[in-house]
């Protein structure tokens, strides 16, 4: 059967991918949180609104359960450039993520990245736990309290100044790669004024690089839209005064080594919408250009009942049903 199902393995709860990206190459994702556990309720979030803020750190899942899945993924022989800790919400809400990082580094020489909104860097314990990560990718989407509140919509007690101060403190203590992510939103933070404010804040943080990202997937709020090319180029020019800027680019999926396509696609779609063409291209690569097989698998995936679709900007995206 084209889906290559191996039910005896059971679905993975924490590990997904690898997913290809310009930033991290072939990245094996490790999700540490229940959906959706977050300190923010970002207007651009691709996994939906935060219905109940979570601000207390805890061990949501047993560490050994997570490490077992990572160990099994490494044993498949799939090419992996990075092991990336992420969350269905704010990654650093997972208490003692530092232990997971240390244990993974005992398993493999593959570098470890952590994607976070950075809202908990004001806590010394959080900054300490990330010191052994090879790269940390926090968010900084605004250079003022007003835009911080409008874009990130944080839980009560979380302020822009606290966020910025936490990033600055972490930069002083951390010797790895600090790549700050900026989500650029049309008509919200893409004006010259907003960009100059953001560049001023970025200079205080002094990251190794700024990763400019765009809301290419369906967001939780309808007003979120892609900025014009002219505004993207302007953002690159202004933010480059603070640090080198990686121009935004779409990633891609790699399903070449997935032993169970249904579970692999489910794991990815449950964490962010996937463009129909992106999925089709990944299957086309897996099946060496056999278009008939690609169409058959797409049909079987659709009939599984696990997925729905939504249209944004003329593109069709797969979302959880």
Image (cartoon, grey):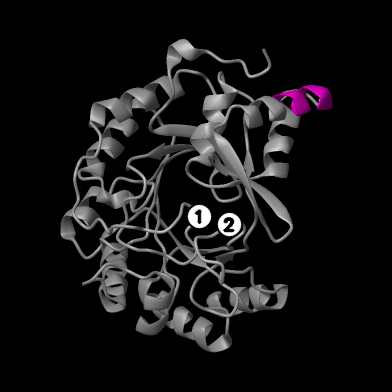
Q: Which residue is mark 1?
A: 46
Residue 171 is covered by the magenta coloring: no
The quadrant in which residue 33 appears is top left
Q: Which residue is mark 2?
A: 218
The quadrant in which residue 309 appears is top right
Tell me residue 13's x, y (percent). Answer: 38, 30
Tell me residue 280's x, y (percent). Answer: 72, 36
Q: Is residue 121 left or right of residue 280?
A: left
Name of the residue lying farthest toward the bottom = 193
Tell me residue 106's x, y (percent). Answer: 31, 28
Q: In this view of the protein, which residue sits in the foreground, 249 or 105?
A: 249
In the image, residue 180 above or below residue 99: below
Asked if disc 1 and disc 2 are in contact, CB closer than 8 Å, the reply is yes
Residue drawn at (45%, 18%) of the image: 75
**Secondary structure under the numbered disc 1 in the rendered image:** loop
Residue drawn at (57%, 32%) of the image: 265
Q: Is residue 285 left or right of residue 99?
A: right
Query: Disc 1 to disc 2, how far (Cα)?
Result: 6 Å
Residue drawn at (59%, 55%) of the image: 217
The magenta stretch spans which residues?
291-297
Badge 1 or badge 2: first in the primary sequence: 1
By secondary structure, the bulk of the magenta-drawn segment is best described as helix
Can residue 105 be spotted in the picture?
yes
Q: In this view of the protein, which residue sits in the foreground, 266 or 192?
A: 266
């Amino acid at each position: 059967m084209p889906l290559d199902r191996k039910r005896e393995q059971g679905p993975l709860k924490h590990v997904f991918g690898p997913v290809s990206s310009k930033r991290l190459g072939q990245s094996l994702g490790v999700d540490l949180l229940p959906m959706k556990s977050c300190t923010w309720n970002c207007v651009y979030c691709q996994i939906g609104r935060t219905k109940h803020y979570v601000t207390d750190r805890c061990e949501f899942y047993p560490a050994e359960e997570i490490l077992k899945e990572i160990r099994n993924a490494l044993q498949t022989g799939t090419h992996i450039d990075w092991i990336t800790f992420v969350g269905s919400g704010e990654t650093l809400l997972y208490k003692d993520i530092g232990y997971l990082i240390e244990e993974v580094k005992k398993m493999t020489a593959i570098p470890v990245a952590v994607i976070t909104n950075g809202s908990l860097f004001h806590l010394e314990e959080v900054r300490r736990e990330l010191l052994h990560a090879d790269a940390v990718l926090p968010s900084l989407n605004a250079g003022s309290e007003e835009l911080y509140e409008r874009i990130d919509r944080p839980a009560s007690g979380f302020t822009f100044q606290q966020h910025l101060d936490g990033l600055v403190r972490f930069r002083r203590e951390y010797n790895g790669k600090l790549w700050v992510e900026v989500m650029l939103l049309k008509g919200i933070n893409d004006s010259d004024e907003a960009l100059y404010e953001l560049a001023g804040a970025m200079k205080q943080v002094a990251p190794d690089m700024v990763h400019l990202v765009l809301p290419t997937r369906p967001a939780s709020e309808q007003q979120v839209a892609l900025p014009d090319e002219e505004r993207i180029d302007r953002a690159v020019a202004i933010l480059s005064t603070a640090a080198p800027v990686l121009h935004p680019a779409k990633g891609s999926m790699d399903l070449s080594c997935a032993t169970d396509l249904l579970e692999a696609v489910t794991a990815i779609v449950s964490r962010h919408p996937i463009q129909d063409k992106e999925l089709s291209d990944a299957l086309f690569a897996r099946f060496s250009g056999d278009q008939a097989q690609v169409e058959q698998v797409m049909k079987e995936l659709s009939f599984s009942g696990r997925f729905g679709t939504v249209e944004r900007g003329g593109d069709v995206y797969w979302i959880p049903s």
